[in-house]
């Protein structure tokens, strides 16, 4: 396996077989939580693979026991992208007054960049093990195919624990039936790999020890096909989804997500519903809120 670390801080870019790129989220001690650094490492790696004529298929994997713990809430690293990193055209300041800055930030790093990855012309396969939580679902849903280990499990906790009607890249209804999506969001329950497959969200469930090999085997099968044909197949299916309302529902869901943030901010001064959080997470958030209020009072 040829491995290039390139310039990435939190991603490894590999070519494990001819015509296949494997992008590995590499923050195992943080459950591969996605912050600004990882977001733009991923964007660069996807662009690199898409622009390489020797690559036909892209695998998105995660190092360690868990595929993605979601958005990085640790406070480590930058909170905002730089002007040089920004790939969207919305413009304006991420420090804008009222909700303008928050909206610009989320539109850039969660909505538009995720749609960009979803529409990457080359087939993408998520190689998933362990837990996938909230923002991690966005990364999974940007991929065309999902192969997961038997121990994989999925959860969007934003409604049950944060007062938000689902993650920013709102795909729930197009990943399962309407009633299944409602129950999943309203309860905040975990979906096992097997149940996710039954609902149509996952393509294959394999033993954990076979995950990488089986994902690579699938990638090689697709990579051996005519690359233009594979691009056209992807474009056709994505267009059919969008024609059936996926993009409109996604954008509407994103704006409801913003309303949830604004409501929480008005009530508690923090962009998620503190009272709904699990005790440990609530204690950490209350410390952050107290520190912000103290700083503002100085």
Image: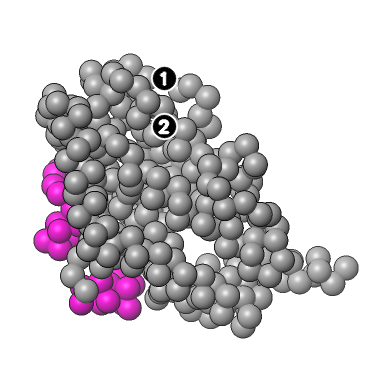
Please identify the quadrant where the C terminus is shown. Answer: bottom right
- Residue 202 visible in the snapshot: yes
Secondary structure of the residue carrying numbered label 2: helix
Instruction: Give coordinates of residue 63: x percent, y percent.
Output: 37, 38
Q: Residue at x 40, y 70 (%)?
A: 252
Pointers 1 and 2 in contact (CB under 8 A)?
Answer: no
- Quick check: 135 left or right of 220? right
Cα separation between marks 1 and 2? 15 Å
Q: Which residue is mark 1?
A: 4
Q: How many marks?
A: 2
Image depth: mark 1 or mark 2 in front: 2
Q: Which residue is mark 2?
A: 47
- Label 2 neighbourhood size at 10 Å, few (<14), some (14-19), many (20+)? some
Specify the segment rendered in magenta. Answer: 179-207
Which quadrant of the figure has residue 3?
Answer: top left
Question: Which colour assignment does the render follow?
Answer: one colour
Secondary structure of the residue carrying numbered label 1: strand
Instruction: Give coordinates of residue 162: x percent, y percent.
Output: 48, 73
Decide whether residue 220 is among the magenta residues. Answer: no
Query: Which badge, 1 or 2, comes first in the chain's sequence?
Result: 1
Q: Residue at x 16, y 32 (%)?
A: 229
- Residue 156 visible in the snapshot: no
Which quadrant of the figure has residue 43?
Answer: top left
């Amino acid at each position: 396996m040829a491995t290039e670390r390139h310039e990435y801080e939190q991603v490894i870019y590999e070519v494990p077989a001819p015509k296949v790129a494997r992008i590995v989220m590499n923050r195992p001690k943080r459950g591969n939580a996605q912050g600004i650094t990882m977001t733009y490492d991923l964007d660069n790696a996807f662009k690199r693979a898409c622009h390489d004529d020797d690559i036909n298929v892209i695998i998105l994997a995660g190092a360690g026991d868990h595929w993605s713990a979601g958005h990085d809430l640790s406070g480590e690293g930058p909170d905002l992208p730089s002007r040089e990193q920004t790939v969207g055209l919305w413009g304006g300041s991420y420090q804008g007054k009222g909700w303008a800055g928050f909206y610009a930030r989320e539109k850039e790093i969660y909505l538009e960049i995720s749609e960009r990855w979803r529409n990457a012309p080359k087939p993408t396969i998520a190689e998933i093990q362990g837990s996938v939580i909230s923002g991690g679902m966005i990364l999974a849903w940007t991929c065309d195919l999902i192969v997961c280990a038997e121990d994989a499990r999925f959860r969007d906790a934003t409604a049950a624990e944060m007062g938000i009607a689902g993650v920013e890249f709102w795909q729930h209804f197009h990943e399962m039936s309407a009633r299944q999506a409602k129950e999943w969001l309203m309860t905040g329950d975990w979906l096992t790999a097997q149940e996710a497959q039954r609902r149509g969200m996952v393509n294959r469930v394999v033993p954990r020890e076979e995950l990488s090999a089986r994902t690579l085997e699938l990638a090689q099968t697709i990579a051996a096909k005519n690359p233009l044909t594979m691009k056209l197949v992807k474009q056709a299916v994505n267009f059919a989804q969008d024609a059936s309302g996926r993009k409109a529902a996604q954008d509407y869901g994103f704006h409801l997500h913003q309303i949830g943030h604004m409501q929480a901010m008005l009530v508690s001064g923090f962009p998620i519903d503190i009272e709904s959080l699990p005790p440990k997470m609530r204690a950490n958030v209350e410390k952050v809120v107290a520190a912000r209020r103290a700083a503002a009072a100085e």
